[in-house]
Amino acid sequence: MTAGRYHPVAAILHWTIAAVIIGQIIGGLYMHGLPNSSPVKFDLYQLHKSFGLTVLFLSLVRLGWRLTHKTPPLPPSVPPWQKIAAHATHWAFYVLMILTPLAGWAIVSVSPTDIPTKWFGLIPVPHLPFFGGVEDREAAEHLFEEQHEVLAKIIIGLLILHAGAALKHAFVDKDGVFQSMVPAANRAWLGLAGIFAVLGAASLFYLFAAETPAQATPSRSQSDRGVGNWVVDYGQSELVFIGSENGNEFRGAFGNFEADITFDPDNLDDAEIRVMVTTSSATTGDSLRDSNLPGSEWFDVKNHPQATFESDNVRALGDGQYAANGTLIIKDVERPVTLEFGLDIEGDEAHAAGHANLVRTNFNLGENSSWFEEEGVALEVRVEFEIHAKRKN
Ligand code: HEM
Ligand code: HEM
């Protein structure tokens, strides 16, 4: 005896939600493991949020459908304990299909980074309303991250049981239970293909057409496309910042910056140094601290994806030492800054190492943060850089 079939609407929703959830788990784990400097991380997070909210919406539709429609009974050949296990799994899935994306939505709603959510770059999605009064946003964010991860892990466990049982029905029992979820009508397959075409098109739109902060982010020039008479070897160069939190020194780095350098020690009048730094590429190795850096309190990467330094003049201090006076712009605040550096040119290869000292609140960095308090992050930040470059031919 064979079981009946699920309505094509239930089947379309089942397979769409299943595929997207599996993609969310793989994508979620992958994106979480990427370093902040990865140029795709930001976009993956935005896509993860868009697909996850799609799961939430479709799951609510599906729950509504389930509560108002009959499902085909399992065949009598299925032992009672398996029937109970199947029902328990199905209802647990409904709970997880709704709670997991809600926990994800809660993460972005309480996060101090306050990055807005736009469904595939098209439809603005507000933050969840319940968290206006939350004081310790970092702790709340951390809590929801943990819950989101645990819920996703429970889905993985149930999925193994559920898919295993479904495949056993299909290949061992051959009792029609698997077939009950496979829609017979061609129209249903067209419907499924239609949903995936819409989601695929929305993803492509997000990646290529939607205005996103990440698109304003420059990618590191790998060749000699930069201006000036030197080509920076970014693999050997670094831009580091050193601060102190609660009296302990920490070091961070910008993984992504570009420098256009026109420099000839015999003609300093024409010397020009321009450095463009991708603010979202800042990392310090501490995940809690790093999760705060892109937010509006700190680099506000959404509105200010770049920080720049542009020299006005370069002076020789003697003994291979130089000082470049110029303007540093962070978060639209312009301040005069002097970079002091030592330079060593051998043939066509140059090595420069230097530093500048900044007061971070002059650039509105972390001025309202709880870290601003006495015990928090010191106001002085030292920026150190090391540049290896080759002369352009
Ligand atoms: C995370 C992914 C998945 C979720 C959340 C999920 C969820 C569900 C739910 C809630 C039901 C109950 C049907 C209803 O109440 O409308 C169901 C039934 C079913 N699922 Fe899945 N499913 C997933 C993945 C899969 C996979 C990968 C397979 C196949 C390998 C599969 C095969 C089936 C079959 C055959 C049924 C009908 C079985 C029955 O009526 O007892 N599912 N699924
Ligand atoms: C059913 C849908 C979803 C599934 C299965 C899912 C799954 C996952 C997984 C497996 C991770 C990696 C967890 C980790 O390694 O810490 C993750 C991370 C994340 N998800 Fe989801 N997710 C879903 C929906 C959403 C939604 C709707 C949002 C927001 C609107 C969201 C926001 C996030 C964020 C912000 C992270 C990163 C958390 C962190 O860095 O620790 N997710 N998700």
Image (spheres, helix red, strand yellow):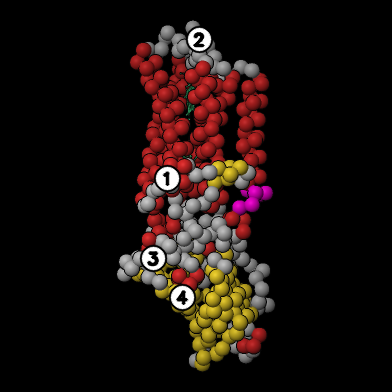
The Cα–Cα distance between marks 4 and 1, rounded to whole angstroms, is 35 Å
User: Is residue 150 at all visible to an observer of this figure?
Assistant: yes
Marks 4, 1: nearer the viewer: 1
Q: Secondary structure at mark 1?
A: helix
In the image, 362 versus 30, the foreground residue is 362
Range shown magenta: 207-212
Residue at 67% x, 69% y is: 225
Where residue 177 appears, as percent x and y from the top left, is 49, 16
Q: Secondary structure at mark 3?
A: helix
Three-letter code, disc 3: Phe
Q: In the image, is residue 208 part of the stretch drawn in magenta?
A: yes
In the image, 141 versus 167, the foreground residue is 141
Residue at 47% x, 42% y is: 128
- The answer to whether residue 176 is left or right of residue 209 is left
Q: Label 4: which residue?
A: 358
Q: Secondary structure at mark 2?
A: loop
In the image, 295 versus 343, the foreground residue is 295
Other residues around mark 3 within 10 Å, as few (<14) / some (14–19) / many (≥20): some
The Cα–Cα distance between marks 2 and 1, rounded to whole angstroms, is 50 Å
Q: Label 3: which residue?
A: 372
Residue at 43% x, 32% y is: 96
